[in-house]
Image (tube, rainbow, N blue to C red):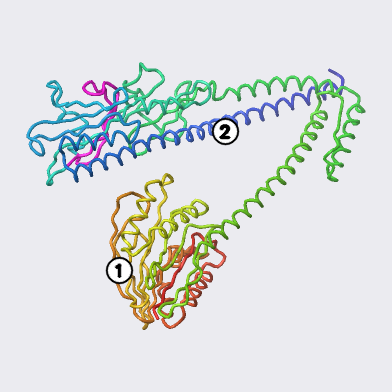
Amino acid sequence: MNSISLRFALSAVAGSLLILALIGGVNYYFLKQELLHDATVKAELIEKNAVNEIHNILIQTKITINTMKERLENEGYKKETLDKVIKDGLSEESYFFGSAMAFEPHVLRDKMFCPYYYKKDHTIAYKDVSLNKNYDYTIQQWYTLPKNAKSSKWSEPYFDDVGGEILMTTYGTPVMHNDKFAGVLTIDLSLERLEKIISAIHILKSGYAFLLSNNYKILVHPDSKKIMTTYKNKTLQFNQCIQKGKEWVYYAPVASTGLILGIVLPESELFASLNKISLISIILAVIGSILLIIIMLLISRRITGPIKEVTKLTQEIANGNFEKRIILKKTKDEIYYLSRSINRMQESIQNYISDLKEATIKEERVESELTIAKSIQMSMLPHALEQNPYISIAAMLKPAKAVGGDFYDFFYIAEDQLCFVMADVSGKGVPAAMFMSVTMSYIRAYSSKQLPSKIVKRVNNTIAKNNDANMFVTLFLGILDVKSGEFTYVNAGHTSPYIVTTVGEVSVLKSSNNPVVGAFEGLEYDDYTMTLKKDEKLFLYTDGVTEAFSEDDEQFGEKRLEEILSHSKHILSEICVERVKNAITEFAGECEQSDDITMLVIEKR
């Protein structure tokens, strides 16, 4: 122990071990938090996918039962009508198990009557539940809940031993007749569908998911013995991992259904990699301490030689040479590991440069494609109208992104009948632009000598039928007699246009509160008719005009627009559009454009 080199080595090792222990402890804590955070994020992603799938099932159930209810209200409640409507409803989705129309006695029926249709052996079977003397459907929860609430309700899951003989839940909606409760229309969902969704969730090796009702009954669980038993822990914290003994559990509500999704992560698996890394770190620390003592007792020249080699290599790297490698004798000391790290760093830099070149090429390709897409989109818009002594038209479209979802159109459907459109698709970018192209095509295809409401109705039904993306469009469509100035129009959820008179008065065009296009099939739309007088202007626009923001986060607003239009009574349509565009540009300043800006001006001459 009297040797200076030995004492120095032992002191250095002791200090190193202390530092390593401190670093290891801090790393262990933060790595544990990071693993827990990653597990929470994974659980959240899994939960969102499962909840979204369940939510879609529940939403489709509501849509189907509302369609069935509307058909029954329109077609009546005869046995043959019930057969057709309910069977059609059951056939819409594979996960619908059964459906019933339970009548309240002495309203639509003199006595109890509950026809029940359910799937059995790839067919739809039928039975009248009211004929079962041991079963009174009027006191069942699936009947009393919507009856008492006078609104649609989900029942608690239950085992149906009368019709389906399975574990199910029922969605019921009340049926009214002359303001009196007339019965309940239901759709049954087998919990097997939910079980498949939950059973498909896998996390780590033995992690699993389960589903609870709003009364904490276990509906889906890997252990079938626990199904329909009460969950012990009723104090839940949503959207975070909570430690329960040797497990971590993530709870999340399933939309507005009252159901609760739980995801279980075993602690031994969750922190297995951390424990392994910690053990490896401890082993490496012990080995390193031993090597450090030995190395510090060696002759200094055995250290300075590799240091010089490393210094030369770093100078090469500083000069931009990433090809040269350093090869040292495998001594397992700091210099050796440093050389290996430098070699790996060189490889990483080379890979990064290569990846950066590829990314740059891909980005340039995407920008080129977007430029082409923008050119195609703008070419689809009409740029000018054939010279006409009765009207003048000016328009502009400035997308917020490379391509946008706003569009306008004008074209003749007869010699003196001009059809014009202003529309705004929900969303932005490429999806909105594609949806815009489809909508424009349908409008052009369906436009003829008929009322605008009929055209919009056909367009709505066509789009809604195949609208898997759940996008919609607000639009204003009018048909103008260019000679008389009389035009008929329909406003489907769009911003109301302005009329600018010859004396500078600016007024909002009257219209009905029509629904947007593409959301649901079978919607009706109302027309309005008015006359555009000589030298009056019709100004149509999308909400990107009034909702443009300044650098102070202030909106452009209707008042500024109306002020500009009031001073545009005697100017050309093109100048009117240019004035509004310049005013928005000046107002926004350096603020990035947040929405597509589109305008269309029609002036009667």
Seen in the picture, residue 479 relative to 287 is either above or below; the reply is below
Please report the residue visible at 45 percent of the width from the left and 29 percent of the height from the top: 242
In-image side of 537 versus 7 (left or right): left
Quadrant into which the N terminus falls: top right
- Mark 1 vs mark 2, foreground winner is 1
Q: What residue would you read off at disc 1? A: 510
Q: Nearer the viewer, residue 61 or 377?
A: 377
Residue 164 highlighted magenta (yes or no): yes
Residues shaded magenta: 149-175
Q: Residue furthest top?
A: 225
**How far from the left and from the top, in percent, is residue 385?**
47, 72
Between 446 and 100, the residue placed more toward the observer is 446
Q: Residue at x 67, y 26 (%)?
A: 21
Q: Quick check: 232 left or right of 72? A: right
Residue occupied by mark 2:
34
- Residue type, mark 2 in image: Glu
Residue drawn at x 65%, y 51% is 365
The residue at 15%/29% (across/down) is 139
SS for dot 1: loop
Q: Is residue 248 above or below residue 473?
A: above
Helix, strand or loop at mark 2: helix
User: What amino acid is labelled 1 in the image?
Assistant: Lys
Residue 128 location, x and y as percent? Answer: 16, 27
* Picture quadrant where residue 416 is located: bottom left
Q: Residue furthest front?
A: 415
* x and y, in percent, of residue 170 in the image: 26, 31
Residue 13 percent coordinates (x, y): 77, 24
What's the CA distance linking mark 1 and mark 2? Answer: 58 Å
Which of the two labelled residues, at mark 1 and mark 2, occupies the earlier sequence position? 2
Quadrant including the C terminus: bottom left
